[in-house]
Image: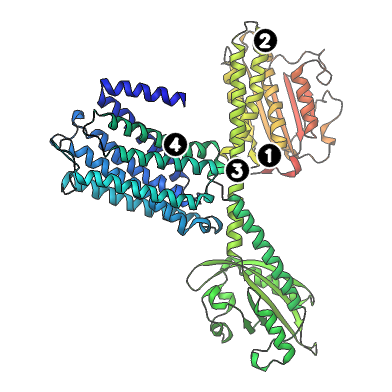
Amino acid sequence: MIFWAVIIGLLHILSLSNNLLFHTLVEMFSIIVAYIIFLLAWESKTFLENRYILFIGISYFFVGTLDLLHTLSYESMGMFPGFGTNLPTQLWIAARYMQGISFLVASLLLIKYGMNGVRDYVRPVEKSMFAWRVFFIYAVTTLLCILSIFVFRNFPDSYIEGSGLTLFKILSEYVISLMLFCSLVLLYFKRNCFENKVFKLLAASIILTIFSELTFTIFNNVYDFQFALGHYLKLLSFYLIYKAIVEMGFGEPYSFLFRELKYNEEDLRQKAALLSEEYNRMCGIIGINKYLAEDVGKWDKNEKSYYSFIQDLHGILFQLNKDFRLLFLYGPVEEMIGYMKQDFLSGKINWEEIVLPEDRHVIFENREKLKSNLDFVIESEYRIRAKNGEIKWVREFLQKISDESRTSAKFQGSVHDITQYKMAAEALKKIEGTRIKEIHHRIKNNLQVISSLLSLQAEKFEDEKVLEAFRESQNRVASIAIIHEELHEGNSIDTLDFADYLQKLTADLFSSYHVGKSHVNLKLELKHVYLGMDTAIPLGIIVNELISNSLKHAFPDGDNGEISIQLQEADKYVSKPEKPETGISCQDEPNIDYILTVADNGRGIPEEIDFINTDSLGLQLINILTEQIDGCIELRRNRGTEFVIWFSSSENSGKLK
């Protein structure tokens, strides 16, 4: 509050001495906010379920554009000579009409889609099409407004020199205020579609906009206090909507952009429960082992009760003969796939024909299994193409049965539409992936903050050993931060290409130790191995320590040299004749998948240093972290220093590209 009181105070002082600059600053703030809101909404259009936010975001691009023209059209700007004071007032009214209508229509969208827009999964392509339609409508509307004002000049006059504001302008401000008030009422009734904080900010922004509009009905010229007051209110209203959409969108994306996640999760549970219930009912049906007569009118009394039972089943029931030809079909066939029952019963269409070619093998494989398993129930999922061309996912239950004499085999089962279930599951998977990537992004940012704090703290010291300790700590933090950066930017949420990671890590380390190290070459021979975090982080710190030691100690006095890193599969590793210093060959270790070699041709580690039992923090970390990943490490001192780390991917999650 104090901050904004100071800002408004400074702006008021400015308005008294330079009204044009005051007006330009206020308008440019609102224009920038409008464009930022648009960018956030537009980039989120494929996964943003709340159509209110998406609609407002798109509309603000065009509101901001009209406000920009309004700002540039002031006579003192000299951008549009010959138009006078009427032009900026017309553009102002056009922008405010667009803003008021946008809030009202967005609120009506909440009434129409509201919780349905949250609970029912909408495909990303449909969301994108909705966004493009809205954008096109606004683009056409804005173009017509501009043509009406600048070219055809049939837009009603809003300001007349010598008379002041026109009746149209004043009445328009009241109409706009009424639209904003109606949108506020509708927003209140659908407030459950927003987080409480977002709703309050949106409501406060609309209220300030209403007061701003009313203020602009009573000023006579741009030097009146009412003119400045209206702009102060507009400034605050845009700041509040910025807080509601932009800050919440970036600061708390999972309480804002992905608020619908919990509803999707609940829907997914309900769908799973429904399918589980139908599965149990289906098992009961197919367990009866009765031939279902095609003519329901011929059923006896007991079979009539059975018919009553299957009426409530959500799916299509069918029975096949021993050659898998259709004998019986019951259920919402036309509703599910568009074809009539008779199309299938008459043989005009075979079920296999509507199954996607790449999924047909599932049906044929299941049929082969059933021929040799009398009491075997097979559950499978595949895709079909409905009559209207729509692709649907279905789940099929199939069992082999016999007639009363048990002499001839038949098959019966059911087919259920699980398209919504699949879409919900896919949406949850994508949202969960985005959530985890956001976590990696935040961890990386926090680690970078820690690295920066270490750098600032190091500036207070001059002792070389202290500075070196700070640099080592920074590099260790950076080695972890790069992993989270890779996981955030990569395609996978839990594994990363360790070869790409090593390239970035070594580049950063060489940059960190750049003084006098231009004579040291780096040789990389890396296979594209994908590792999980449990392996990648410890291994990354190990490489960081080994490379740092080589850069610090292996090449004193500017000696030329080379550092090499190799990453390969264990079965392709060619063991060297020298015996490792550990006395134990890592080749004897079980379950080894990969081998990482870090070597240099420098002066080597002194013979008196036992790298297993040492006081060096770096070497202690190497041994501890090697043990943590259930690895094995070997040291060879011939022709420099060579560390060989034998390890397996965590839970066998690593894979070779």
Residue type at the position of mark 4: Leu
* Residue occupied by mark 1: 531
* Residue occupied by mark 2: 466
Question: How is colour applied across the structure in the image?
Answer: rainbow
Pair 3/1: label in front: 3
Pair 4/2: label in front: 4
Q: Can residue 500 be seen in this view?
A: no
Horizontal and vertical percent position of residue 143: 26, 48
Q: Kindly report the distance in space between the C-alpha atoms of the residues bearing marks 3 and 2.
A: 39 Å
Residue type at the position of mark 1: Leu
Outermost residue, top side: 462
- Of the residues under marks 2 and 1, which one precedes in the sequence? 2
Q: Kindly report the distance in space between the C-alpha atoms of the residues bearing marks 1 and 4.
A: 44 Å
* Residue occupied by mark 4: 240
Outermost residue, right side: 583
- Of the residues under marks 3 and 1, which one precedes in the sequence? 3
Q: Can residue 77 be seen in this view?
A: yes
Residue type at the position of mark 3: Arg
* 634 shown above or below 53: above
Q: Tag 3, which secondary structure?
A: helix
Q: Tag 4, which secondary structure?
A: helix
Horizontal and vertical percent position of residue 250: 51, 37
- Of the residues under marks 3 and 4, which one precedes in the sequence? 4
* Residue occupied by mark 3: 435
Image quarter (top left, top right, bottom left or bottom right) of the C terminus: top right
Pair 3/2: label in front: 3
